[in-house]
């Protein structure tokens, strides 16, 4: 039985409608997909998809998880991880470890074997990154201290999920599938293990020395779909090689992403992969919703509600204690605990894997899937109840955000030619972080030879700007050489990041006028100041007095900058522009003459005062 074209259309309709509606209702896109899946699934309205169809879709959409892990690897830049090491590995490691122990004990109390209880405890210890970050961002709390602590914990959980997915078969060793009873433990195949390690090492070496060069060659062709195809091929190719070595697809995708984490083409690859990952992940959660056994909720609502309360209560309590230990105030620690107390999307992935490898029975995994879904639905309600309780008891309102130190911000430089590099050199000397983007692979290769770093990407694309975290930048330097690309980028930045200061390079007067049209206030013509300096040197070489040289340069600069503004009022009227240009020499001559008269009067006055 195959999924029909009509069913594909219904899946796409669910993805197109569910996420926006869920965001509007402030329940998170993951919950929106799950609700859409429940409605389309065998337990929903009309039973559009059968259990078998839901399983087929789930199997196909697992590639979305593979792409998600690839993007996680892509974001795993060593410098970033090192800067956050204490919060990520200290706070995050403590949360996963303590929560997993508590939930393992709870699992054993309800009758699970130790191995199954440990696996379930680790799976349920993970929270929903997409859901929690969306809730925090909507409330303006992502930059608050508890929001940044939550981000660090979620980052560690994402890292922890990768080995958990890869090690699912290990938990099944010694378990008869789905029974929790002992089975024959296969002897460890040493040769297979060595082979797997060798292939992983070979992939890392080949990827490190080959991938960046391959992307550079493709980028030179300027064929955008070729870059997208190459990025997808990288993920799929490494995944296939890893599977042949007996390593999970998830670990293979993560390694592929990590290999490109320091690549100059990272931002472009991320922007190309993101739409596929988002769509397939939405389909995956929709398929999980289809597979939810709602009969369980109808038959045993008391048991499921109790398990949900226990899960949320245990996680929130541990998180609150860790938040206080980490130095958060009680109100912030409470928000920290409630915001990431739910189960997460990786729990769905791990529970699907647990059934595949026989770590948990199908009914056990179904119960936990329903509990995770209920815990996610409870998060916005708990945060709302916390707000109401704080207001009722007159507790001080929680600060919506925390102003970060100035050195937390960065500068985005679009265009890394000679103009952009000068800006970058000064920023680097002042230890101000920056992200440089350039569309030319040859330029990126050239600056790397001189110790600079730029990322390949079209800065006029919103997804590239978001990948460069332009929304968190302190300034945007528009140094693109091509006038059309410069204007497209300025228009995009002004539309999407209206509060971000833009300092723009203009090729000529017309370019400067067009930038002013777009609302860019700080416009600098690239040849104007250098031409003035050259003129100053020429006048000095002609033995003009220094005072006169400075007066001439100052007069011209003032006149030209005033004329730039005047021309802007009617720069589309070529006749007026030409008339102004024809009268300009006479105007300048008159200004110089007036300045000379003023200078002569001033000199005479000074001589009299001296006498």
Image (cartoon, helix red, strand yellow):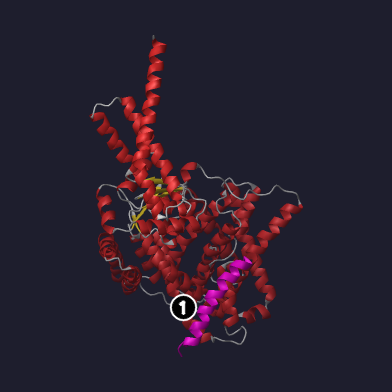
x 36%, y 68%: residue: 252
Identify the image quadrant of residue 464.
Answer: bottom left
Q: Mark 1 points at which residue?
A: 356
Disc 1 element: helix
The location of residue 515, given as percent across then percent down, is: 43, 52
Q: Looking at the magenta stretch, what is its main secondary structure?
A: helix
Does 3 lie within the magenta span? yes
**Can you see residue 363?**
no
Query: How far from the left and from the top, in percent, is residue 374?
Result: 63, 70
Q: In this view, does 496 lie above or below 176?
A: above
Is 233 placed above or below 505 here?
below
In the displayed structure, does residue 205 sit left or right of residue 406? left
Task: Work out whether residue 249 can be spotted.
Answer: yes
In-front residue for pair 325/565: 565
Does residue 309 show up magenta in the picture?
no
Counting from the top left corner in percent of width and height, residue 276 is at: 43, 71
Q: In which quarter of the image is residue 314?
A: bottom right
Q: Residue furthest top?
A: 611
Tell me if mark 1 has few (under 14), some (14-19) or many (20+) residues whose alpha carbon lies within 10 angstroms of its own: some
Q: Is residue 570 left or right of residue 423?
A: right
Give the left or right position of residue 410, taking residue 305 as reference: left
Extreme residue toward the bottom, this view: 1
Residue range highlighted in magenta: 1-27
Quadrant into which the C terminus falls: top left
- In this rendering, would 376 be left or right of 87? right
* Residue nearest the observer in this picture, 191 or 592: 592
356, 260: nearer the viewer: 260
Q: Residue 433, position in %: x, y? A: 41, 46
Q: Is residue 232 shown above or below 89?
A: below
* Residue at image location 55% in from the left, 45% down from the top: 403
């Amino acid at each position: 039985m195959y999924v029909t074209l009509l069913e594909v259309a219904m899946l796409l309709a669910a993805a197109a409608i569910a996420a926006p509606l869920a965001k509007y209702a402030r329940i998170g896109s993951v919950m929106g997909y799950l609700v859409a899946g429940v409605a389309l699934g065998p337990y929903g309205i009309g039973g559009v998809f059968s259990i078998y169809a839901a399983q087929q879709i789930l199997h196909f959409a697992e590639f979305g998880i593979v792409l998600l892990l690839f993007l996680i690897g892509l974001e795993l830049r060593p410098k970033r991880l090192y800067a956050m090491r204490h919060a990520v590995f200290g706070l995050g490691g403590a949360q996963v470890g303590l929560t997993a122990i508590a939930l393992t004990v709870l699992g054993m109390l309800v009758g699970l074997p130790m191995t199954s209880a440990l696996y379930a405890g680790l799976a349920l210890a993970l929270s929903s990154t997409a859901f929690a970050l969306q809730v925090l961002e909507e409330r303006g709390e992502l930059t608050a201290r508890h929001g940044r602590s939550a981000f660090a914990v979620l980052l560690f959980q994402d890292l922890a999920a990768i080995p958990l997915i890869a090690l699912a078969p290990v938990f099944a060793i010694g378990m008869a599938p789905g029974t929790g009873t002992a089975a024959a433990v296969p002897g460890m195949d040493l040769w297979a293990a060595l082979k797997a390690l060798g292939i992983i090492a070979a992939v890392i070496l080949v990827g490190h020395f080959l991938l960046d060069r391959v992307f550079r060659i493709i980028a030179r062709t300027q064929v955008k779909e070729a870059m997208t195809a190459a990025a997808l091929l990288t993920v799929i190719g490494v995944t296939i090689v890893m599977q042949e070595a007996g390593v999970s697809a998830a670990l293979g995708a993560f390694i592929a992403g990590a290999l490109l984490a320091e690549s100059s083409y990272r931002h472009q690859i991320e922007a190309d992969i993101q739409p596929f990952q988002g769509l397939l992940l939405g389909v995956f959660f929709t398929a999980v919703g289809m597979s939810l056994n709602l009969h369980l909720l109808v038959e045993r609502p008391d048991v499921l509600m109790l398990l949900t309360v226990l899960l949320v209560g245990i996680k929130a309590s541990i998180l609150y204690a860790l938040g206080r230990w980490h130095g958060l105030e009680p109100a912030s620690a409470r928000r920290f605990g409630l915001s990431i107390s739910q189960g997460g999307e990786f729990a769905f992935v791990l529970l699907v894997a647990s059934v595949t490898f026989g770590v948990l029975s199908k009914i056990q995994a179904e119960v936990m899937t329903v509990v995770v879904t209920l815990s996610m639905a409870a998060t916005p309600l708990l945060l709302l109840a916390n707000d109401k309780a704080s207001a009722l008891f007159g507790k001080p309102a929680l600060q919506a955000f925390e102003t970060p130190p100035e050195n937390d911000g960065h500068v985005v430089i679009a265009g890394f030619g000679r103009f952009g590099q000068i800006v970058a050199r000064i920023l680097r000397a002042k230890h101000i972080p920056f992200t440089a983007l350039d569309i030319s692979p040859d330029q990126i290769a050239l600056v790397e030879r001189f110790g600079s770093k730029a990322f390949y990407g079209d800065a006029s694309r919103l997804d590239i700007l978001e990948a460069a975290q332009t929304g968190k930048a302190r300034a945007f330097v528009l140094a693109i050489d091509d006038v059309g690309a410069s204007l497209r980028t300025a228009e995009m930045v002004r539309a999407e990041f209206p509060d971000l200061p833009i300092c723009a390079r203009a090729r000529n007067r017309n370019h400067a006028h067009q930038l002013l049209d777009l609302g860019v206030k700080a416009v600098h013509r690239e040849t104007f100041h250098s031409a003035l300096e050259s003129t100053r040197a020429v006048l000095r070489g002609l033995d003009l007095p220094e005072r006169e040289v400075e007066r001439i340069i100052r007069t011209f600069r003032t006149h030209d900058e005033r004329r730039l503004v005047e021309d802007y009022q009617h720069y589309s009227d070529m006749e007026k522009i030409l008339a102004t240009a024809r009268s300009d020499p006479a105007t300048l001559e008159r200004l110089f003459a007036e300045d000379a008269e003023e200078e002569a009067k001033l000199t005479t006055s000074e001589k009299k005062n001296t006498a």
